[in-house]
Amino acid sequence: MIRLKDWSRKPSGQVLLATLLFCFIFIALFLGLFKSGLLYSAKERATRASNLTVLAAGAVYANGMQVVRLSNMIVIATALASAALLATGVGELVALGSLFTLDFDPLAFVKAVQKVQDLLFGITTKLPGLYPLLITVETFSIAGQNGLKSTWPGFSPNNWKLPTSLPSPILFFNILSIGPKTTQALIPNMALKFRDGSFLTMLKPKKFYQFTRVTDGKVFTYTEDQVELAPGSRGASYRVKPGLENQYKFVTEIKIPGSEKLAKLANTINALTALKLDVTDRDDPPLHNIFVFGSYPTSIADPSGNKAEIMTLGQVTVSGSGLEAWKVSDPHYSAFLSPTDPIELAKEMGIQSILSQLGNLLNLQNLFKKAIDDLI
Amino acid sequence: MILFKRPQEKGQALTEMILVIPLLVLMLAGIIQLIILFQARIAFEKTCGDVAREYDAGLVSNPDAINQDIWDKLGVYQKYFKRDSLTLNTEPPQPTLVDSLTQKIDSFGPWAAKLRSYLINYEGQTWTISINCQPPFLPAFVLPNGIGFQTQLTALRYPA
């Protein structure tokens, strides 16, 4: 020990010690650089995996939009065929006097096609449609092949495994337009609805109401959206909505000449609004997007052996000219990456709250139970 | 007269510097070259991702064009790679249940395949891309044959 002490006081010993110290510092720097280089490289791969996965989801989604166009074409064709059948048979039936006695729905074929559309795309059904499920299956498959952690059951016919931890990846369908119940975005959907005759309501005759001021006899006219049913009133008494001139004053409906005819027209329009037509976008303006949240496992471990995982979030937007049947030959829907700032997005859309909820969920069953509860 | 010259401390610092500086320079050079290697690796990974996105958009399709595109996009990093070592191996992605279904539909005949192509018109490819990195001076001394980089990715595109 004493000899080592003496030796370290000699110039040669000092040089060697200093060199060892330098070596230690440089090796530490070297290792740090190597690790950060590996992590940076893994981050690049994680971003790539996320982008390709979300684009794959967009590709299948875009294909689905073309299938919707084709199915709309079938609806229109079926409707035309039904109309043609009715037109050809109508003369004979009228002659026989049996047109109105037949227990036959002329729209039966159209309704059957619409039922298939409903099952295929999950438009009004509470459970996801077959096609949104296909988007999910394909996305999971591509996510796994691109290296994203896959804790869902494998969908390859030869590769079934049970989930062991929190699910990854997680898909959020059309979360930007889903409304306040953001957990519904976990249910695969394509943001579609059946077009109905509701656009005809703009033709519906409006009711007008009047109030005459006693002091000067001035007459004020209000439309039906400016008045409300007076609370606690007997019968249907209306008053001016708060915030408008003469608020809370009772008003009387104006009788317009020929109002009976208008009422009949309104009834007809009401009946037409219940009629289902083709499938169209749920939102106006149309918005179709998918977010994929995933985690990318790396080979870099901390001293306790826990391997680092990189969280990724990607967004794809699917857009096209429209879903109408006559647009079937239009350019296909296209999917493109949308820039995603996870922090801003989490703030805006409440994804953060969803993810924190996910952390508290014990298993997948609870996750879907909550989503289905929200849906119901 | 002095028979034995006493050892002098003069010049000790210079001796230490002379001993340490080559080691220091070697290590600094090693660090810089490690950075270059990682930059090359990251550039390669990023380029492959960019080209895969072009494939998604339908801008490239045949393997030769993909190869050339990867090389072109490497840009200033080309000097760290050997062009003739760039290889691309394409294969279909792992089959899903849908693939099994579409194969069954296609087996009914060309009309069924045609009908199926209207309904399921997306396709995918798994790429395995390899390239040999020509490392800078120091790693080249240790690894004269270069360092092989390999990456794998899977992309789906629509329309096929």
Image (cartoon, coloured by chain):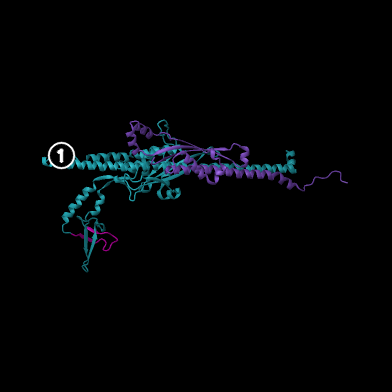
Chain colours: A cyan, B purple
Circle 1: element type: loop
Is residue A362 visible in the rendered image? The answer is no
Q: Where, by quadrant of the figure, is residue B93 drawn?
A: top left
Is residue A341 visible in the rendered image? The answer is yes
Left/right of residue A174 with respect to residue A20 in the rendered view: left
Residue A310: image location, x then y, percent: 49, 42
| Quadrant the C terminus of chain A occupies | top left
Question: Is residue B73 positioned above or below B114 on the image?
Answer: below
Residue depicted at x 23% and y 54%: A203
User: What are the residue bounds of the magenta stretch?
Assistant: A238-254
Question: Is residue A49 positioned above or below A239 on the image?
Answer: above
Residue B97: image location, x then y, percent: 38, 33
Q: Amino acid at mark 1?
A: Leu
Q: Within the magenta stretch, is there residue A4?
A: no
Residue depicted at x 45% and y 48%: A342
> Which residue is label 1 attached to?
A102
Residue A262: image location, x then y, percent: 18, 54
Left/right of residue B147 with respect to residue B128 in the rendered view: right
| Quadrant the N terminus of chain A occupies | top right
Q: Nearer the viewer, residue A288 or B159?
A: B159
Q: Nearer the viewer, residue A167 or A190?
A: A190
User: Tag 1: Cα neighbours inside 10 Å, few (<14), some, or many (≥20)?
Assistant: few
Q: Where, by quadrant of the figure, is residue A76 drawn?
A: top left
Q: Within the magenta stretch, is there residue A247?
A: yes
Residue depicted at x 22% and y 48%: A272
Residue furthest to the right? B1
